[in-house]
Amino acid sequence: MKHFKCLILLAIIFLSCSCVKYETNVTIASDKSVNFEINLGYDINSNKSLDINEVKDIVSPLGFFVDSYHDNNYTGYRLSKKYKSINDISMKNAQETNLANILKGNLDEKNLFKVKKGFFKNTYTANYVYDFSQIYDYKMKLYLFKSNNQETIDAKEYLSNLLKNYPKFEIVEYDLMESQENFNFLSNILNENSLNYEKTPIIIIGNNIFQGYDEQTKNDIVKIIDNIIKNQNDYTDLVSKDFNNNFDLSYNVKLPNKALSSNATSISNDSKNLSWELNYFSPVKINYSFSLFNKSSIILLIIILILLIISTITGIYAYNLYKKKRNFDIKNNTNIENVIPNFENDENTIVSIENLMKK
């Protein structure tokens, strides 16, 4: 019962018109931190509820924090986890990841992004699929709420033999004498359909509820199953058509820089905000890529440039200082009076007025 309710309580929507919300929000910051959130809830007007401990049992091993969540339309729980660096959840050869696996407590976090490293910036690529069929069986659930009496025993035997011919259907049993939880679950279903508890067995197929067991019930059950098979051979498509409006499913990501590419359903904020509409009954591919600057590399380059500039200025200053000192030494250590020119072998040299007069 616990696992049945934890997996987004997806089976219950077949029994009512209540909406289910599953919203994934991912925020990637320029410092490479990643905030991962999932808002999981029911229609605020529904009397359904989730046990926080049951939710924690599934997602806590993954390191997700569970808190309450509500908005104008839904109430439930928020599952959140923050990664210090996107590099912690990135691989060079990352493969496609089914994000729906979070619902069964199974997620390869190291495989969330494919990274192509560069000196100034890294390029990250998300390659996801949301495929809920991997965690939930789309067979038509025939619910049997029973107590220990001959009539319910006969009903179970009849249904078991009947469904052998209908492999797209299966029986989900709830023994009302087993726990108060089972009885409360049935009471909620009956209340939502404005029905009162009368007698067992109670058989539910889609939105069809039968109380008691007789020949007419047998005939009606066969007609309903035949009608479903006749009108829609693939029950998954039938469910999608009849119940898909009961889901509010989405994946949303906020990037610090413009996306390089994406197959998003909607794009805003200069391609920094991307959104996808998900479908519970068919896989949805999610692909996008973006770049983040390597601040450590940029800082290192700036430091190198600063050191180079300082070194150049220091070198120029030292050279000028040396040149100035050399000129100063030449000037102070040279006495012009002690310089005696030799003109003996230079006939064209004018020596002195006195010697000229002598000649």
Image (cartoon, rainbow, N blue to C red):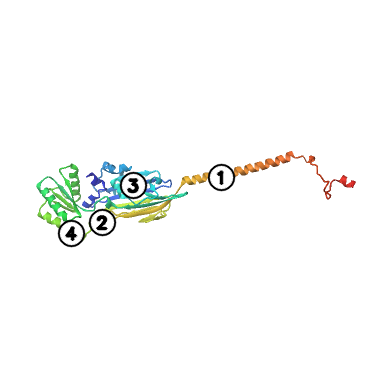
Residue type, label 3:
Asp
Query: Where residue 227 is drawn, which disc sits there?
Result: 4
Cα gap from disc 2 to disc 3, whole angstroms: 29 Å
Where does residue 212 sit, x and y in percent of width and height?
12, 50
Cα gap from disc 4 to disc 1, whole angstroms: 82 Å
- Please state which of residues 174 and 192 is positioned toward the viewer in this rendering: 174
Please, which residue is most extreme toward the front here?
Answer: 345
Please, which residue is most extreme toward the right here?
Answer: 358
Sequence-first disc among 3 and 1: 3
Q: Residues within 10 Å of mark 3 (few under 14, many from 20)?
A: few
Residue 214 relative to residue 304: left or right: left
Of circles 2 and 1, the one toward us is: 1
Quarter of the image containing the N terminus? top left
Q: Which residue is mark 1?
A: 308
For label 3, the SS is: loop
Query: Where residue 265 is drawn, which disc sits there?
Result: none
Residue 157 relative to residue 355: left or right: left
Q: Residues within 10 Å of mark 4 (few under 14, many from 20)?
A: few
Residue type, label 2:
Ser
Sequence-first disc among 3 and 4: 3
Looking at the image, do the residues carrying marks 3 and 4 touch, with CB atoms under 8 Å apart?
no
Q: Which residue is mark 3?
A: 108
Of circles 4 and 1, the one toward us is: 1
The residue lying at 41 percent from left, 52 percent from top is 290
Q: Which residue is mark 2?
A: 240
Cα gap from disc 3 to disc 4, whole angstroms: 42 Å
Looking at the image, do the residues carrying marks 3 and 1 touch, with CB atoms under 8 Å apart?
no
The residue lying at 59 percent from left, 45 percent from top is 312
- Please state which of residues 217 and 300 is positioned toward the viewer in this rendering: 300
Where does residue 15 sit, x and y in percent of width and height?
21, 51
